[in-house]
Image (cartoon, helix red, strand yellow):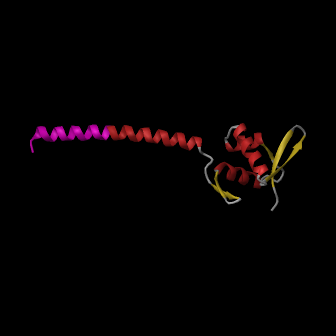
Amino acid sequence: MSKERKDNEIESLREEIKELKDKLENVIQKVDTLVENFSFLTRSVRGGEAVIDLTREEIIKFLKDKPEGATAREISEKLGMSRSHTSAILNELYRTGYLKKGRFRREIKYFLKEE
């Protein structure tokens, strides 16, 4: 094989590697975006329906250590989530029977239901 042909093949491989690297970086960005958008993924089964939600699990775990309860603000700050997302999940957990809530002064506190 001639030196010129080897050099051409090497250059061609370098270009392919660069294209693949660019595609991989694009895929990584898309995965990062998906992870951000669906950071609440885990498995929780209720009423025969599989629900995927890590955030619920994190909230439940947090409230297990808080017998005095916690507000949506406290939970969102501790778990690094937006207040609106936290409130939506708390209300869903309340509606599905995982939590109870009570008003204390001007705030609503959420508690785990005792099993």
Q: Quadrant of residue 113?
A: bottom right
Instruction: Identify which residue, 3 or 90, lies in the foreground.
Output: 90
In this view, the residue farthest toward the bottom is 115
Q: Position of residue 31 (x, y in %)?
A: 50, 43
Residue at image location 77% in from the left, 54% down from the top: 98
Count of numbered tags: 0
Q: Quadrant of residue 22?
A: top left
Q: Position of residue 72 (x, y in %)?
A: 77, 42
Residue at image location 90% in from the left, 39% down from the top: 105
Quarter of the picture containing the C terminus is bottom right
**Residue 69 position (above or below residue 14):** below
Q: Position of residue 41 (x, y in %)?
A: 61, 50
Residue at image location 62% in from the left, 53% down from the top: 42
The span picked out in magenta is: 1-18
Q: Is residue 60 left or right of residue 69?
A: left
Q: Quadrant of residue 10?
A: top left
Q: Is residue 39 left or right of residue 85?
A: left
Does the magenta run of residues contain 13?
A: yes
In this view, the residue farthest toward the front is 48
